[in-house]
Image (cartoon, rainbow, N blue to C red):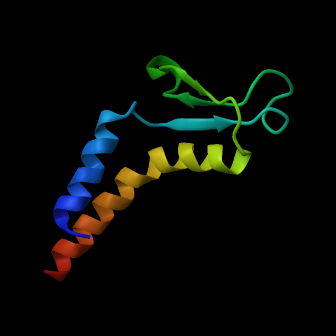
Amino acid sequence: MTKSDLENILEICSKATPAPWTSYIEGRDFDSGSSFIMTGENKTRNYDIEFVKIKPEDQDFIAMARNVIPMLIDEIITLKSRIE
């Protein structure tokens, strides 16, 4: 991937609702209601993302991706700059 590709991914991430995103699965994390992703936390809590139908593993992946993709891209840029 080029530096431009990586910067584009970071730009898209920066436009999304800020991390952390936390996945809550009905039956795993609580007993009633619907599964959702909570965006933000405490004073920075934003909106909840609810799904009509989604596999728990996919929901967990979406929340995790929002939290770690920016860090992974930063790490890749740092490592590439050291190589160059």
Residue 73 percent across, percent down from the top left: 32, 59
Task: Give the residue at x 29% y 59%.
Answer: 74
- Give the vertical position of 14 relative to 51 (above or below): below
Which image quadrant for residue 80? Answer: bottom left
Task: Give the residue at x 72% y 45%.
Answer: 56
Residue 82 percent across, percent down from the top left: 18, 77
- Give the vertical position of 5 relative to 22 (above or below): below
How many numbered circles does the render carry? 0
User: Quick one: 43 or 37, which is closer to the camera?
Assistant: 37
Task: Give the residue at x 23% y 60%.
Answer: 5
Q: Residue furthest left?
A: 84
Q: Which image quadrant: the N terminus?
A: bottom left
Would residue 58 appear left or right of 46 to someone viewing this image? right
Q: Residue furthest bottom?
A: 83
Would residue 44 appear left or right of 27 to someone viewing this image? left
- Give the vertical position of 55 relative to 22 (above or below): below
